[in-house]
Amino acid sequence: MNFLNFFDKKAPSHPPIFFLNSASGKKEEFHSLKPGVVSMYSCGPTVYDHIHIGNLRAYLLPDLIKRVLIYNGYEVKHVINFTDFGHLTDDADAGEDKMMKALKREGKTISLSAMREVAETYIQSFKDDNDAFRNIPPTKYTPASDYVADQIRLIKTLFEKGYAYETSDGVYFDIAKFPKYGVLGKIDLNKLKDGARVEVNSEKRHPADFALWKKGLLGWESAWGKGFPGWHIECTAMIFATLGKQIDIHTGGEDLKYTHHNGEIAQAESVTGKPYVAYWLHNAHLKINDTKIAKSLGNGIRLSSLMDSGYSPLVYRYWLLTGHYRTAMNFTFEALDASKQALFKLKRFVFEESKNVKEGNVNETYRARFHTAINDDLDTPRAIALMWEVTKDASLTLADRVATLKEMDSVLDLGLNDEAGDVVRELGVIAKDDIPDEIQELLDKRQIARATHNWSEADYLREAINLKGYAIEDTPTGQKISKS
Ligand code: AMP
Ligand code: ZN
């Protein structure tokens, strides 16, 4: 039997899925290595601090990929790692170790167990933020310190195959032995050599050779002395241990593309002689005042601070989805305010204006357009625009519009499939019984002012209500108020 035909028969039937593959720089049609199942790995955070809203964008990407693939009938095996030791502050193998920095900051002793303790706190915080943001948890989380033996074994294999060499401070990958190096971002090794800054480590054969093992006083025992595995080796070792030698999809923020991911490819393909990853997907950065949000720059806003300022995690999710994952976005509170309003209107449509309608059917035309949009390299801005089109399409019954929106939201997850009660609370919309008397009085006066076309009085009363910390929206069914 023809192998490929057999695969085709078993493949789920769906419109083609396209991803922009960073390896080719082109949109490519997606085919999984095994029928119906997709393996995906996402570089996780260095757990020396809480994550910021920029990091969340990097985990929204695999969440969307997963939801889109599930929508298309696939099963997805997804792994996210935690870098819980020895990650250096910059891409080169120099700079201060971030985990060490955290130990000092928190007044802890410098030990492996203290490092693990610090990591646990930030691992939990990472999970909490991702849950609040509605990212589906991966099939497995892998803390790098649980896979040290795998990493050492892999370095040993690289050594035996002649891809590694030892220096006084560690073990390095010999980039000259892997001519394909730099496929991501089309890096020219010769240019790297010419343009390299004065090398601190004169024992390295090429400035781009990267550490597989760093010798030190702290760490694990190995054939090359005590120390830590290098940064890139952890991801390759954990992929091999959990997903196999070849995977379908690998994700990460665009900053990881050039050094970390090219390093991973070099390590993996030198060992197996086979392609490592079929599709590389990278998200663009979230910026603030046109500067990348980064923990090390100290400009990292946390999801919890947005919540303290009255924005639900879903408002932030909505805003991110209005941009394409490969487009840099600049965070502003004005933009978030607009998203808050938009999500409020969308939810009001689903939960209030359509409250008493019977169950409807998903409209096939919109379903097909939505499917094409999300299958086209995760085009969420187009998907959101379609949702708005559905709300306004008077040729559809209210019930069918709601059913269509809810199906679309199984992929985007803006809370349109939640229980109505929760939505009202989560958006800060106040139930009638909970409105304080003094506010209710002002609302009643404003309603009279509006009914009698006394617009200046109505505006004055709106301001008075705003000053007391409440926002009003005039809707076809009357004034709606929420905590501002
Ligand atoms: P880190 O903990 O710094 O290794 O980052 C974890 C993930 O977040 C990586 O995939 C980074 O590329 C990504 N990331 C970091 N900063 C940003 C940002 N400002 N916008 C989007 N992704 C980011
Ligand atoms: Zn990684």
Image (tube, grey):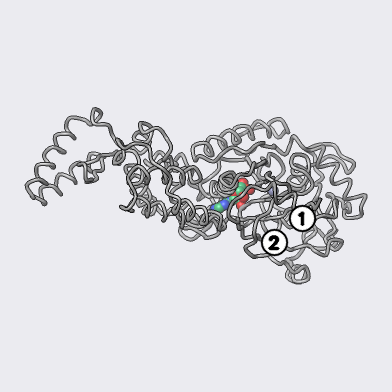
Q: Quadrant of residue 315?
A: top left
Q: Quadrant of residue 415?
A: top left
Q: Position of residue 479 (x, y in %)?
A: 21, 41
Above or below, 206 relative to 143: below
Q: Position of residue 177 (x, y in %)?
A: 87, 61
Residue 443 lies left or right of residue 244; in this view the side is left
Mark 2 neighbour class, 10 Å CA radius: few under 14, some 14 to 19, many 20 or more: some
Q: Residue drawn at (85%, 62%), measured in percent from left and top?
A: 205
Q: Nearer the viewer, residue 246 or 159?
A: 246
Amino acid at circle 1:
Ile
Amino acid at circle 2:
Ala
Circle on res. 23: 2
Residue 253 lies left or right of residue 152; in this view the side is left
Query: Which image quadrant: the C terminus?
Result: top left
Mark 1 neighbour class, 10 Å CA radius: few under 14, some 14 to 19, many 20 or more: many
Mark 2: secondary structure: loop
Q: Is residue 156 visible?
A: yes
Dot 1 corresponds to which residue? Answer: 265
Q: Position of residue 430 (x, y in %)?
A: 28, 34
Q: Nearer the viewer, mark 1 or mark 2?
A: 2
Q: Nearer the viewer, residue 132 or 304?
A: 132
Q: Residue drawn at (84%, 41%), measured in percent from left and top?
A: 152
Above or below, 353 relative to 391: above
* First of labels 1, 2 by sequence position: 2
